[in-house]
Amino acid sequence: MEQETSTQLPAATARPALYATLLRRIGGPLLSVGLLCLALWALHAMASEVTYRQIAGYVHSLHDGDIALAVLFTAAGYAVMTLYDWFGLASIGRRLPAKRVSLISFISYAFSNALGMSLLVSGSIRYRFYVQAGLSTGEVGRVVLYTTLSFWLGLAALTGVTLLLVPIPGDIPFAGLRIPLAIVLTLVPLGWIGLSLAMRRPLRIGRWSMMAPAPVAAVRQVLVGALDWGLAAGVLYVLMPEAIVGGFGHFLAIFVLAQMAGLISHVPGGLGVFEAVMLAGFGASGNQGLEGPILGALAAYRAVYYLLPLAMATLMVIWREVRALRHATVVSPWFSAVLPPFFAGLTLVCGAVLLFSGATLAIPGRMDILRGFVPLPLVEAAHFLSSVVGMLLLILARGLQRRLDAAYVLTLVLLVLGAVFSLLKGIDYEEASLLCLLALALAPAHRHFYRRASLFRATFSPGWMLAIAAVFGCATWLVFFSFKHVEYTNNLWWEFSFRHGGAPRALRALVGAAAVVMLFALANLIRPERPRRDRPDDAELARAMPLLKGFDSAQAHLALVGDKSLMFAPDDRAFIMYDIEGRSWVAMGDPVGDDEDARRELVWSFREACERAGGWPLFYQVRPADLDLYLEVGMSLLKIGEEARVRLETFNLDGKSKKTLRGTVNKLARDGLRLEMVPEDQVPALLPRLKAISDAWMRDKKVREKRFSLGRFDEAYLSRMPMAVVWQGDEPVAFANMFLTTSKEEASVDLMRHLPEGPAGIMDFLFIELMVWAKAEGYRWFNLGMAPLSGLTNRRAAPLWSRFGAMVFGRGERFYNFRGLHRYKDKFDPEWEPRYIAVGKGIAVPLALANVASLISGGLGGVVRR
């Protein structure tokens, strides 16, 4: 509506924000890859005398009692991890069903521990669960902050106390800093507890404020975190060889240092970094000759503490999916939302297992069995193809996270093929069981993978590229480590043998995996990029007309302005209208159309188009009914105001509260004012007379035409819809173009302009007469438009954006009449419904909002001018 405007945001400098974003997105992953390469080089140097057979032999020699004790400690550790979420929810005064919290905590921590990809998988699971359970984005953030603090406070406390009490070998780098490091780490949790005792008011640092927890809660955070890390150390300790020098205290000192190094590196799961520090620590403390058993213990630790919980989580998914097949109402929406990222993470693990298996030596006894009934060419082909399948699974995992139907089908096929190849290449029934287990879990979940978009259109974030690079890098290292006793020759590539063909098979498999990822990258590079589209022509507007007329929101008529590009779904089942300002691709409103599948797919397609172009996806003025469309693709939501909608069924001018409006309408009717609805075919002839009214109104208000979320006086635009005209005698004195839906769900107006010298109260007269007319025509709602920043709270616990918006709403009258606009619309007794902006995570929100303001105002200059 014409009275609306954008929040007046200061213009931001784009270049520094762009550089900061690039550094944040690319710098971290590049550093992690560098640290991984350094760790693998260190492992190779420290284990130069160790053979793969020694490591495998130690794993097979572990006692059943030690393995059972390690499993028991693992179960206890994951039970303790659920306390992070329990106490985090308690800290914000929220309680949720115990079964849900325990299940989601177990699944999310199984992934974050194994993959170190909390933002990609675990974070996505936790965010969607808590939002769908009724928590606000701010509350979710506070829970995540609580759990993260507990995690690090516990690690700092355990590391600091251990280093104070237990000396570490002098040959370890920075060993001379043991006491200073221990003091600093110990002071961190002590300082946190002291802060909780001393601080009674929020601590303010610039624009940020933080309230310390109660002393009991602070102590609880430290103790839970320390217990979690202590149990994790216990799992590895019972698997270590008995001949290691030193007791549990000595072991714990090296363990916590290795874990801290792995976490700081940001390498997925600390893979390679953790092992390198552990081997260096024990190698420097009199354990020479035990490198093989120590690496074997570390491999067993990875299997028990990381892979076993993943397998258990998979069984839970299978169980719930089977129940879903029998009873469609069993699986709740929050659990359905976490399945795609869950399967994506597990597919990533299975791909890594196949690549690691292809890079190592097969068990000789099993190869002897194969030799009796499987031809050598079939074994060679199976070994090569299993690594190819592994790399394809790494790539398809991203497609599963994006809910692609093609990725689902191909993943199922490749999991079955991978299981067959695992058996044919070395009777690796453990790998085959894992792949079959995932295939069984994935098979009944087809309904969660509904997108029929191309695999080659999926974008890969830096985190995903880092994960794939890390897995491939580790597989490469494993090849050279496992077969370092084999002297390299050019003829090695063409050797085929049951007994001595391990190294050639591993090399060929590694090249096959590399070829897959290079071909996929090349296909993405040479695919035709869809250029930025021009403004819609008459043919495109004609395609959009049936969709916007049948849509339940009259706002869809803004597509007819012609200043926004249109993105259509296949078969014209839905469309999105959008424009681009800077890096921001801003869609106006929700996808338009009645086909929910097409609307959902359009949101995915729009986001992926933005990512391919390096842009930021935004959806402006979205409705509560469609919020799941944006949460599903990982976008965040910010409330930007409330929309006033009058329920016409109960609308009338009776009662004391309507006395003023009733008097205004009656007086102007006696003065000869009348409303006429002019059909669209008669509007062009009337436009010259209405143009004079529009020009006079703009001169009086000292404003210029807006755009994007508002229409403008344009003959082509105004001729596409009916016009409401207020006449005084034979002269028009006011007008408004009408947005009318064929379903009669909603009626609204866009431009509302009147002669400055016209009768007082003419806009009230126009609104009232339009509502009376719409009610008589059978419309359910009359939309009065949005009141920017209305309904935002300024409470201490509210998000920063909400508090800022509430402050501007209350004190920003010198810039824009926020309160006045809300009061004007409120006198018609509307129902206020929140409106949001959906933004992609990790984007510069202030700059994106400035881009939106620039779009509406017609440029940055219009942001600061009327």
Image (cartoon, rainbow, N blue to C red):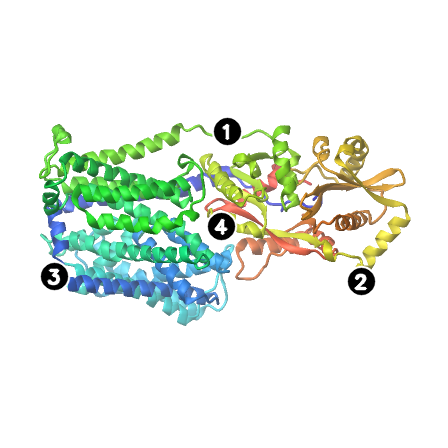
The amino acid on which the numbered mark 2 sits, given as a three-letter code, is Gly
Where does the image place residue 762, in percent across and percent down from the top left? 82, 47
The amino acid on which the numbered mark 3 sits, given as a three-letter code, is Glu
Local crowd size for mark 1, using a 10 Å CA cut-off: few (<14), some (14–19), many (≥20): few
Q: Earlier in the sequence, mark 4 or mark 3?
A: 3
Whole-Å distance between the Cαs marked 2 and 4? 43 Å
Circle 4 SS class = helix
The reply to whether dot 4 and dot 3 touch (C-beta < 8 Å) is: no
Q: Earlier in the sequence, mark 2 or mark 3?
A: 3
Where does the image place residue 714, in percent across and percent down from the top left? 71, 32
The reply to whether dot 4 and dot 1 touch (C-beta < 8 Å) is: no
Residue 531's disc is 1
Q: Earlier in the sequence, mark 4 or mark 1?
A: 1
Whole-Å distance between the Cαs marked 1 and 3? 65 Å
Residue underneath mark 4: 631
Whole-Å distance between the Cαs marked 1 and 2? 58 Å
Circle 3 SS class = loop
Image quarter of the C terminus: top right
